[in-house]
Amino acid sequence: MTAGTYQVRDPRTDEIERPLRPPTPAGLTDLAARLRTAQPRWVAIPPTRRAAALLAWREEIASARDELVAALTADTGRLTESVIEVDSVLGMLERWAAQAPALLAPPTPRQAAVPGIEIRAGGVPYPLVGVISPWNFPLLLGLIDAIPALAAGCAVLVKPSEVTPRFIVPLMKTVARVPELSEVVAVVEGDGATGAIVVNLVDAVAFTGSVPTGRIVAAAAAELFIPAFLELGGKDPAIVVAGADLDRASSSILWGATTNAGQSCLSIERVYVEETVFDEFVSRLVDKAERLKLAYPQPDAGQIGPVIDPAQAEVIERHLTDALEKGATVRCGGRIERLGGGRWCRPTVLTDVDHGMLVMTEETFGPVIPVMAARDADHAVELANDSVYGLSGAVFAADAEAALAVAERLRVGAVSINDCALTAFVHEGEKNSFNSSGLGSSRMGHASLNRFLRRRSYLINNSAQPDPWWH
Ligand code: NAD
């Protein structure tokens, strides 16, 4: 190990705890080689036995639940979402252990159009998959791609964000207690420099993070001719049209915009409301937003945790200043507060906003809800699609069919109907990112596992006759 220059901070106090401890480049190269050496044994065991190893890991994570929640709470400063992260991972392990064997079963052979030729399909996993993940959900996003890759038969090298490394030690303890698995999965500390080395050591990379870093990773992967699955930033819109249940819409949007203090790729970052119901919607939203409390001084004191990364607090501040300078009205919240050394932002509702403001066009990644009036559903769709992003969105209308008629015109990969941010909990629906929000096959649904297999076909000539084209 070498001491990195990055200093790990406590998000609640801003105190420096310790330097980051990344492996040396040579140590990382050795680790990748060890994972590669073990992978052929892992892929050779039946998928049902790999599923059993995933379930054994699930048991270990369940027994280490408290320790993991404590580490994640230290990493991120928030408690409720740390519990959700661990429980989501338990669910993912269970789901992939149940689904992977059937997904990996060889499909029924079929006849080719050419007479006498049979096609048998197979999948060959990438030997070593690199996972590079962000700080907003350290455990969940460190494992959401790693688990299906392992189920597929790959070895996996995970490099989470330098901002939130404390969960790695307790997680690796759970891995160590499952011998078969411990040979094929490793999670290492490190910053961008370590991430760049990881990209160079693997056969495919699953990256979750910002658009600028995603672009760098995609370019590096292109040089290496390896696939990069990119899950990047978003500016998710919610649309509320006349006839929607405004009580429901305001409660759901408030949750979707402020959970994890707005630090989610799938956060609602802008709201378009049909002008006839605008005032009533805003009044309900502000009323509910003002009732939410900061999780300060104790992590269980309220719903809104601290801003995890100081750099993100600067982005939020820049967006708020820009909006206020350009005429936005603060209906509640409205600034970064320093409490106990940490950086906090109360739920912030803004009106009098437009697309000339950063808060409507760039990812804010904070509990900030700019609400803009739209003339009608067409206008709301036009505004929602006026974005460089295209991750997901939400539509509220009188009923599901009315909402779907609006939703199908949005250029995003998933739309929650009469609800918000459902992709946080529902991982079975396949989705692609639109625009700059990502690249590659769906992380959700069966495609999530299938993208870690290269397709191979066996073309079998069962005919006793010579092919007509032979010499
Ligand atoms: P980031 O891009 O700064 O960092 C992400 C990861 O990339 C970190 O582990 C970092 O160390 C690593 N990295 C940095 N430079 C690298 C390089 N040159 N080569 C390889 N790796 C490198 O993102 P962040 O600030 O940690 O996370 C927040 C961003 O993540 C937001 O934009 C958010 O929307 C996005 N995100 C997307 C999803 C999704 O599913 N689409 C989910 C969560 C977060």
Image (cartoon, rainbow, N blue to C red):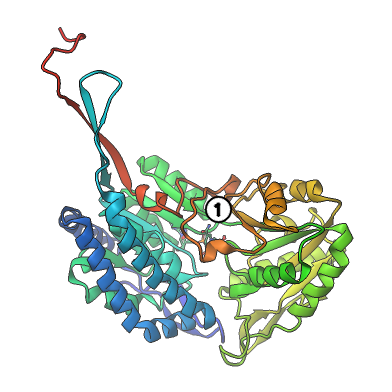
> Is residue 182 rendered to the left or right of residue 354?
left
Mark 1 lies on a secondary structure that is helix
Q: Quadrant of the C terminus?
A: top left
Residue 171 or residue 124, whichever sits in front = 124
Residue positioned 55% across, 53% down in the render? 212
Residue 449 in the image: state x and y as whole percent: 36, 52
Name above or below for residue 222 compared with residue 137: above
Residue 370 or residue 87, whichever sits in front = 87
The residue identified by callout 1 is: 212
Q: Quadrant of the N terminus?
A: bottom left
Residue 464 in the image: state x and y as whole percent: 10, 17
Residue positioned 41% across, 62% down in the render? 144
Residue 1 or residue 349, whichever sits in front = 349
Q: Is mark 1 within 8 Å of ligand 1?
A: yes
Residue 161 visible in rendering:
no
Image quadrant of residue 222? top left
